[in-house]
Amino acid sequence: MPTHDLNLEGAAFLKDLNAGLYEPAATRSLGESAERSSKHTRSITDAIPYWQQWREAANGIKSYAIAHLDKLLTQFESGITARGAEVLYAENAAEANQLVLDIARKHQVKTVVKSKSMVSEEMELNHKLAAIGVRPVETDLGEYIVQLAEQRPVHIVTPAMHMSAADVGHLFQQKLGEPFSAEHQNLTRIARKHLREDFVRAEMGISGVNFGIADTGSLVIVENEGNAGLSTSAPEVHVALMGIEKVIPRIADLPLFLNLLARSGTGQKLTTYTHLIHGATPGRKLYVIILDNGRSNVLKDPAARMALFCIRCGACLNACPVYRRTGGWAYGWVYPGPIGSILTPHLIGLEQAAALPFASSLCGACGEVCPVKIDIPHQLVHLRSRAVSEPSPMNKPLERLTWRLWAFAMGGPWRYRLTMWGVRLGVRLVPWIAWHPGKLGAWTRGRELPEVPRTSFRRWWRNHRDHLQPKLPAPEQPAERASP
Amino acid sequence: MTSRDAILGRIRTALAADPRRPELPPVAQVWPHTGCGVDQMAQRFLAEIGEIFGEAYRVPSMGDARRKLAEIMGQEGCSRLGVMDRPLCRELTAAVAPAAIAWPQPDWTAAEMAELPAAVIEADCLLADTGSAMIACYTPQDRLLCYLPPTCVAIATADRLAEHLPAAWPAIAQRAAAPELRGEFVFVTGPSRTADIEKVLILGVHGPKRLVVLVVG
């Protein structure tokens, strides 16, 4: 397991006090925005007669890619190296950070413009750059806003979905010295003005990678704002950060994935900018850092490999009733929502994130909308099984003992009756106990127990059954049976 | 052992535990090919780009395209144009005063190019069903022309229209596979946009606010 420099401050699901009992405080706007996006996307995908065939095809290609990952990675490496790029591998976030810092020092970088990269969030790269005196600037508008607010993104695609225009206006006033405005056009103009200065000044640009194409050695980056285009072309140095799972076998498969990603992510037919980068352009330097950071652990468990199919569209977040109520921070790490609940335990270990697979109602909405047909609900159940059978906070001797006792109590009629008598007595005593230990205390502080009936249903039935015989209508005369 | 060897070694060990290796599926068709004609594709392209707040004009000749360019320059008050050095761009700007044209130079910096009010670029392919233009950029300056100036005019002939991305893809993929190729193919689908604040759509966040595609013929 790689060593992670984690900051789990926002991990409400993972805090001891509320473990398993977190009551969300997400804004209503986040839930409404996610629901609106989900409905919009659903209406678009429902109108495409080939949608299910596309999902099936994408799932097949991803299955192949993951099962031949070593071959495809070396093919991709060889192709893009031949086009003038330098490919570097990093086993974990610390090594990847070191590689980026070395590149920054080598090229005497003072300012870095970054387009959206989930891998860089895994690496906590901005803090590392700042520590050596390099100024990192997030250039995606949503990422820029959360960076100025010193927060984490709440969503993979729309990072500042929790903030209102007025919130952004106050933020720009405070951090950029701009007059307050809550008008969207004006706020965007302010961001454009400030970020333009950084684009033309920066010595290095950092981007994520949506797809690495093995047979041509090309990078694919999709975006809407133009910030990825500028981040990868204006500075002299471009560093592309790519997880090992981003490689796909053929350039011929790209139209399929582009159609799926744009529609599932933002409900567009094609994103505004789809960049196919074929190596370094003259006078520019291109580095590709390929990061493992726990991904190869997923491969060890064949039942879990599907988690690596994710193309980061965010559709499962918008569809998830839990995410809509809790927001992204509640998931504690970089990847929120249902996909976060299956990726995070793999990437940072069950020891730290075993609670996440339990943060789901298993309604199945995430699995239905996933464009690459990841069976997220079954992945969650699989991880729950692992969380209670492998070393993890969810695998506790007390909990195991509790469930064994429960199984014993339910194992025969007399044991059941005795247990129910004890439960009735216990529940009546609860209001008289001022302090409750552990999780029970967290539960009773925020909830009232329902009133317990004075008698059990079984006893009530014994006393009343003679008076409650159903009055059945008199049977009708059978009709004359027709001859066969 | 290098990190590369360690990662590839871990992958190989993990994959060896499960001998099942799925076959590579055939390339998906995505959209059917209907074989529609140029007029139909042009009509669809104009409609689609309008839906995403871009502009497109189909003009019968290069002379008409030049008049349209002059009109756009007038509307935007452009005194200078950054022009991609391609045959169609040269034809389109033949009537523009030479002093008003800036041909990209290898030593141009992003700061200098950010001063350009408008760019003229050449689209190698137009996708009818999405209103997209594919621009092939071979230098950093070509790339920056697509993103830095606030107004961007792309020119293409009508024979470059394709029904949709899968129809255009074999030719694009063949070009992309050439080992000597450097640079970028960028599919531009409307002007730069964001909906990051309260999901309200705003145009021109970082790239061009106005995108005009001239389809000649």
Image: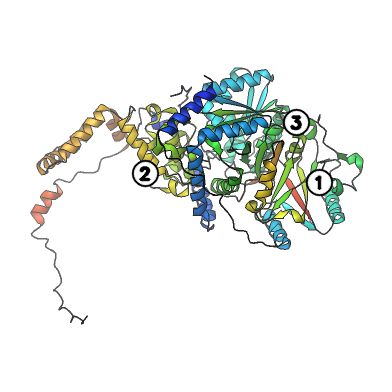
Front position in the image: B103 or A28: B103
Q: Position of residue A256 (x, y in %)?
A: 57, 48
Identify the residue at horizontal 56%, vertical 25% (top origin): A89
Task: Name the quadrant containing residue B108.
Answer: top right
Mark 1 lies on residue: B76
Of tags 3 and 1, which is closer to the observer? Answer: 3
- Reading the image, the residue beneath label 3 is A282
Callout 2: SS:
loop
Image quarter in which the C terminus of chain A is found: bottom left
Q: Are marks 1 and 2 on the same chain?
A: no
In this rendering, which labeled residue sits more in front, label 1 or label 2? 2
The residues tagged by marks 3 and 2 sit, at their Cα atoms, a distance apart of 53 Å
| Label 1 – label 2 distance at C-alpha | 54 Å
Which three-letter amino acid code belongs to the residue tagged 3? Answer: Pro
Closer to the camera, A42 or A28? A42
The disc at residue A361 is 2
Of all chains, the one bearing label 1 is B
Q: Secondary structure at mark 1?
A: helix
